[in-house]
């Protein structure tokens, strides 16, 4: 029963849970809105309670209906409950099974979730790895390039490293710009860029150092090839060029020659890898023809230029290169300190300079932006002035003509080498002119010693030959022709001494030595002729004239030697024309041209001869003075000896023999010498009478002097030298003669009466001289003890005093 109630209550509860619409047959769900609006309308009115009552009534009605219905379906319901309970057991069993399955499933799901998570993680890792691989693959070219760059930098392969750097900066790094390490890499690449620049500059510095070391060798090779092309013998001491290239060679031939030289040198100087340290200087001297790469490797220059061009520092590099090369040029232009001592110093100097400009020319032809023609011209213009100054200075110390010729040949080869590269060598041509002038000065200094040796070796006696061979040797040295001498038998005597042919031969040797320097300078024959004449005139007017002037002034020369020197100058003067012919033969110039400078030998030898004549006169006077120093007059002599003094007789004998040696001199020389001798004797005798050392003179001494003067007058009257007019030599003794006549004749009345008149007998006797001698005569009379006891002597003394007083009055009136 309880079960039934319980079931009934459940049934009622079950139906109450049903929707009202289901129970009361409400409107379908489509009218829900309408029911809602109705309900709202009800609640909005005041009939809500009534509606609630009706609703309760309605519910009770329906509850009854429900009870009825439940009663009707109670059994089925019970059965359904029983079924449900059965189902409940089944459901519980199923529930437990389900829980078991659920726990199993939960465990499996948990494991599955773990595996799924692991799988998700694995797939995420795989995806990350794939992404990483893709990213790394994108970075690998950058890293490979960077590693390659580091390796190239380590191996000092800077040019490939620069290419790798460009690839990194312009191709690879933009692809990884979103990575932070790319910024660090960019910064490191900037440092690498600077490292490449610095490393390339280190290579350039090494190149500059090596090129400075090997420039002389390059210059030597360049000058040797130029010598080969021009057919120049660089080892010759005299003339170097063999006239195969003349000044008239066509311009095409010259261009072809220049092209050959530059081609050959370009083949010598090219790019290459060469270990400079592996070759010693001794090996360079052995190898005559080195290969191109054996000389210099220019690749550092080009690499450095390209590197700086890529690094946008081309201008900086060019300025640095030019600055360093200018410094090296200044070093090359500094001559060795002992350059003037040997030709090797000049060779070393010129080789270094040629090597510098050959290298620069090669760089200009292969890298025109680095070195251009205007830059080279500027450097050359500065260099050529310093070269000319250095060579001019050092050559001025040179005193060896052979070395001067070598310097000239070397300068010519130097000029020819640089001319092939387009450099102007006009200053070097002018330098050669200056060196030629100094060469002439050196020759003249050398010929000073040559002439002095000739003068010292000469015996100053006419040449005497005893055989035709000896005669022919003299004629070959000196082209003297004399028909009388040729017809004379042997032994023959030339009028001149050995000095004449030797001096003539040495003048010719000097002209030939001057010609050696002027040859191969591409001068016209007429210009060479003028130059030789100018230098020969310098030799004659300065060197030979000076040597002869020194010679004739030697105190050791005797009078006869001076006479022979004067004779020699006559024949040296005649050689002037032969020397002009000799110069014309050497140069091939015509002697008929009016502008040709004539040799000044005639004037030079004429002046020397005049000087020699004066020296003859002076020597004659000195010899006469030696005789006159033997004069030992007894000024207190009472009576004369009755003949001329012995010293005077010896002097006259000497003069007579001397004037006989004047036969080969010109007539006027002998006449002047004789006239000079007579005048000098008269002056000496006059000086003896008037000398302050002679305090008194006796009449006997005065008469002895008169005898000596008479002897001299006899000598003058004998005409020891022909050609004088009557009385010319005697006039030399006229002053002395009138003074002696006046003193010995005591003709003072005539003297005072005719004084100042042209017809005066004693016109040449001056009051002063008369006073001087009279005072000495008075002094001699004072020394005579008994002179005062004689009336005649006392009268003579008074007369003397009167004459002295009148002479002093004349002297005062004339003053």
Image (spheres, rainbow, N blue to C red):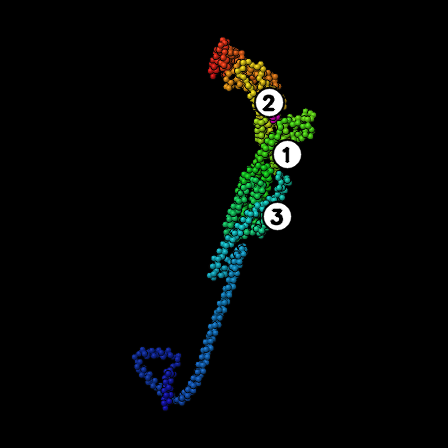
Q: Spot the residue most to the front.
A: 785
Measuring from the top left, give residue 739's x and y in whole percent.
53, 15
Circle 3 sits on which residue?
287
* 418 horizontally vs 40: left or right: right
Taking the spot 31% from the left edge, 78% from the top edge, the residue there is 44
Whole-percent x, y for residue 409 in the image? 60, 40
Point out residue 7 in the picture as x, y percentages from the top left corner. 38, 88
Point out the frontmost of discs 3 and 1: 3
Q: Secondary structure at mark 1?
A: helix
- Marks 2 and 3 in Cβ contact (< 8 Å): no
Q: Which mark is residue 669?
A: 2
Stretch of the chain drawn in magenta: 560-565
Is residue 475 inside the magenta stretch?
no
Q: Is residue 562 magenta?
A: yes
- Say which mark, if any, is on residue 713: none
Disc 2 to disc 3, C-alpha distance: 72 Å
Between discs 3 and 1, the one toward the N terminus: 3
Q: Quadrant of residue 11?
A: bottom left
User: What is the distance, in whole Å, between disc 3 and disc 1 at their CAs?
Assistant: 41 Å
Residue 21 placement (x, y as % from top left): 37, 82
Q: Secondary structure at mark 3?
A: loop
């Amino acid at each position: 029963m309880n079960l039934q109630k319980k079931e009934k209550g459940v049934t009622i509860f079950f139906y109450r849970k049903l929707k009202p619409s289901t129970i009361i047959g409400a409107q379908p769900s489509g009218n829900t809105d309408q029911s809602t609006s109705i309900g709202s309308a009800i609640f909005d009115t005041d009939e809500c309670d009534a509606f609630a009552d009706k609703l309760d009534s309605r519910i009770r009605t329906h509850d009854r209906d429900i009870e009825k219905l439940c009663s009707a379906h109670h059994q089925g319901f019970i059965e359904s409950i029983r079924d449900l309970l059965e189902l409940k057991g089944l459901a519980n069993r199923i529930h437990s099974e389900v829980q078991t399955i659920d726990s199993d499933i939960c465990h499996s799901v948990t494991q599955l979730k773990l595996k799924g998570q692991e799988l998700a993680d694995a797939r995420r890792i795989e995806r990350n790895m794939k992404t990483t691989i893709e990213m790394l693959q994108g970075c690998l070219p950058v890293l490979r390039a960077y590693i390659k760059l580091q390796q190239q930098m380590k191996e000092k392969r800077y040019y490939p490293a620069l290419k790798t750097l460009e690839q990194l900066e312009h191709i690879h790094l933009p692809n990884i710009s979103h990575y932070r390490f790319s910024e660090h890499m960019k910064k490191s690449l900037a440092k690498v860029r600077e490292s490449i620049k610095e490393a390339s500059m280190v290579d350039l510095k090494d190149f500059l150092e090596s090129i400075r070391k090997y420039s002389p060798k390059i210059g030597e090779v360049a000058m040797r090839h130029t010598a080969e092309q021009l057919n120049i013998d660089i080892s010759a001491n005299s003339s170097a060029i063999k006239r195969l290239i003349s000044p008239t060679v066509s311009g095409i031939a010259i261009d072809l020659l220049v092209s050959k030289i530059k081609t050959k040198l370009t083949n010598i100087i090219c790019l290459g890898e060469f270990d400079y340290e592996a070759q010693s200087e001794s090996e360079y001297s052995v190898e005559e023809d080195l290969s191109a790469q054996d000389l210099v490797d220019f690749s550092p220059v080009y690499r450095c230029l390209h590197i700086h061009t890529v690094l946008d520092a081309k201008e900086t590099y060019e300025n640095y290169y030019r600055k360093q090369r200018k410094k090296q040029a200044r070093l090359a232009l500094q001559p060795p300190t002992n350059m003037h001592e040997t030709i090797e110093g000049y060779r070393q100097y010129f080789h270094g300079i040629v090597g510098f400009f050959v290298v620069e020319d090669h760089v200009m032809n292969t890298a025109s932006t680095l070195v251009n023609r205007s830059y080279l011209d500027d450097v050359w213009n500065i260099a050529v002035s310093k070269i000319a100054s250095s060579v001019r200075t050092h050559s001025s110390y040179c005193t060896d003509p052979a070395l001067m010729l070598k310097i000239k040949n070397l300068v010519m080869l130097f000029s020819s080498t640089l001319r092939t590269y387009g450099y102007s060598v006009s200053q070097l041509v002018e330098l050669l002119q200056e060196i030629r002038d100094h060469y002439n000065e050196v020759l003249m200094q050398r010929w000073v010693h040559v002439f002095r040796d000739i003068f010292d070796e000469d015996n100053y006696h006419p040449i005497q030959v005893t055989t035709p061979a000896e005669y022919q040797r003299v004629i070959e040295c000196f082209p003297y022709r004399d028909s009388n001498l040729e017809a004379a038998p042997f032994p023959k005597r030339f009028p001149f001494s050995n000095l004449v042919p030797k001096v003539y031969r040495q003048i010719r040797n000097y002209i030939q030595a001057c010609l050696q320097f002027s040859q191969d300078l591409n001068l016209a024959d007429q210009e060479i002729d003028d130059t030789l004449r100018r230098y020969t005139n310098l030799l004659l007017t300065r060197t030979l004239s000076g040597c002869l002037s020194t010679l004739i002034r030697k105190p050791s020369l005797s009078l006869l030697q001076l006479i022979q020197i004067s004779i020699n100058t006559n024949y040296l003067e005649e050689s002037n024309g032969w020397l002009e012919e000799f110069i014309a033969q050497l140069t091939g110039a015509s002697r008929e041209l009016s502008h040709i400078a004539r040799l000044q030998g005639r004037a030079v030898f004429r002046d020397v001869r005049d000087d020699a004549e004066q020296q003859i006169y002076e020597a004659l006077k000195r010899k006469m003075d030696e005789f006159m120093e033997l004069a030992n007059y007894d000024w207190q002599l009472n009576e004369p000896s009755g003949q001329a003094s012995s010293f005077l007789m010896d002097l006259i004998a000497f003069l007579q023999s001397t004037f006989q040696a004047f036969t080969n001199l010109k007539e006027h020389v002998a006449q002047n010498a004789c006239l000079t001798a007579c005048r000098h004797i008269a002056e000496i005798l006059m000086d003896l009478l008037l000398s302050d050392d002679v305090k008194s003179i006796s009449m006997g001494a005065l008469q002895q002097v008169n005898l000596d003067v008479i002897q001299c007058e006899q000598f003058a009257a004998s005409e020891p030298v022909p050609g004088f007019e009557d009385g010319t030599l005697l006039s030399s003794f006229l002053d002395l003669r009138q003074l002696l006549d006046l003193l010995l004749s005591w003709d003072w009345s005539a003297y005072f009466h005719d004084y100042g008149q042209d017809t005066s007998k004693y016109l040449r006797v001056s009051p002063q001289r008369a006073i001087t001698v009279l005072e000495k005569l008075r002094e001699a009379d004072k020394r005579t003890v008994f002179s005062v006891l004689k009336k005649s002597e006392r009268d003579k003394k008074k007369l003397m005093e009167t004459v002295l007083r009148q002479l002093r009055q004349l002297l005062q009136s004339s003053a």
